[in-house]
Amino acid sequence: MSSDKKSRPKARLPRGFRDRPAADIAAERQMLETIRRVYESYGFEPLETPAFEYTDALGKFLPDLDRPNEGVFSLKDDDGQWLSLRYDLTAPLARYVAENFQHLPKPFRRYQVGTVWRNEKPGPGRYREFTQFDADTVGSASSAADAELLMMTCDALEALGLKRGEYIVKINSRELLDGVLTAAGVDSSKRGTVLRAIDKLDRLGADGMRALLGKGRKDESGDFTSGAELSDEQITSVIRFAEIGKARDDFRKRIGQLTGFGSIATNAANNLDEIVGICVRNEYETDRVMIDTSVIRGLEYYTGPVFEAQLTFPIKNERGNEIVFGSVAGGGRYDDLVARFTGQQVPATGISIGVSRLLTALTARGLSPETKPLIVVLTTDDASRSFAMARELREAGLRAEAYVGTKKFGDQMKYADKRGAAIAVIEGADERGDGRVTLKDLNRGAELAKEIESRAEWLSEREAQITVRRDQLASAVKTLLNR
């Protein structure tokens, strides 16, 4: 083996990352545009922040944090300062607000869509790089700000084609959990581990959560995650809280029993009632927005209400088993995040849609938006004519490309087929001499190929191919597409 061959890099993807083909990108782009229209209709405006932030700007609010830069991808700048790829869009927003606080309207309302990175263990459907779509209101302590985000999320999900009953937006409060932990005598240093354990309830189940609240848990690969090491009584209190679930007639009684009817938990319950009440009075009933104590969110910076949008219908996973997809969006109130920079508390609330996750669910449901059908223009001897026809089709509102490869007609047809083109426009010397073009309906041709057995039958079948006058190109293509 030559030294040159030895030095060649192996073509491979890093673990937890993926390539995305054109169809996935086009579907995501259309989904993002639908969400964007909903958010802008509510008056939210866009903001962009860079992919990198100074690591200290991310603070202690890192996912599954055991050492200063775990959970994020970091590097040193040329001046020796640590930079990290953002792990969400909320910490950069807090930094932006702190820098520009004096010049921003209060409250400040923004949406942002962008890639985030998590230096965590990848798994099926869990990537280290993914896209989030956030909406936040900074500078308002009103329950109305929280309620608006919940209603807007409902509108976005329905604009994407989901029906009522196919999703639910759940709301809980960190202050309720704090009341439970205080009453159970749980040390505050264990709060983060408890939060992450509860947040994994839908993925790991009650047994997995119990293990993480106790000594710890070993996953299928053999990796061990340390637990909160709570006592059996403390674990029971936390599990009883999560298992209360949705609010019922005895909701306040059961919360009171776990928290000792303390004022913090009582005020938190009142706040939840007010948020849901605003939604109900605006016809977002409890079939769309509801209180549920099992929702807690894993990040530590939330200070009050927390939200989670969940899909309720089953889909098939990679193994073909039916599962309930669960959460596709989450967020909550984080009144202390800006204060890390300014020392002054600035109330804030936000929600984030997991774009890739939601798109996977919509695709499984058959709701993924489709791109316009492609028309490929083929000619064997004059590329300029292909470009002219493709331009004419685009001016008529169609999606068209001119083939720029070999002059072999067989290669051109193979290309059109691999591109998934709906129609091939063919102009050879004979067609040009007659002032005509041939339109081949590739979808119909594929159907006929399955039905027709003999070559004679194929040659006599003309449904999949028509010849039209050159000046009727655009109208004929539209007619064929509509058919």
Image: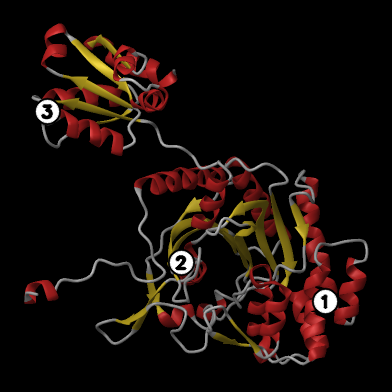
Considering every residue shown, the one lying at the far front of the view is 454
> Which residue is under mark 2?
127
Q: Nearer the N terminus, badge 1 or badge 3?
A: 1
**Amino acid type at mark 3:** Ala
Q: Nearer the viewer, residue 309 or 136?
A: 309
**In-image side of 408 versus 376 (left or right):** left
Q: Residue at x 43, y 84 (%)?
A: 69
Marks 2/1: CA–CA distance? 32 Å
Query: In the shown orientation, is residue 28 left or right of residue 63?
Result: left
Q: How is the image coloured?
A: secondary structure
**Mark 3, secondary structure of its residue:** helix
Labels 2 and 1: the sequence-earlier one:
2
Residue placed at 78% from the left, 78% from the top?
A: 239
Residue at 29%, 87% in the rendered image:
80
Could you tell me which secondary element the residue under label 2 belongs to?
loop
Residue tagged by mark 3? 383
Q: Is residue 34 visible?
A: yes
Q: Quadrant of the N terminus?
A: bottom left
Front in this rendered view, residue 161 or 215: 215
For residue 275, say whether it is visible.
no
* Residue 413 versus residue 230 in the image, above or below: above
Q: CA distance from mark 1 to mark 3?
A: 72 Å
User: What label sits on residue 217 in the rendered view?
Assistant: none
Placement of 252 over or under 274, stated as above or below: below
- Residue name at image x 37 percent, y 14 percent: 463
Q: Quote the CA–CA distance across marks 3 and 2.
A: 43 Å
Amino acid on which the number 1 mark rests in the picture = Arg
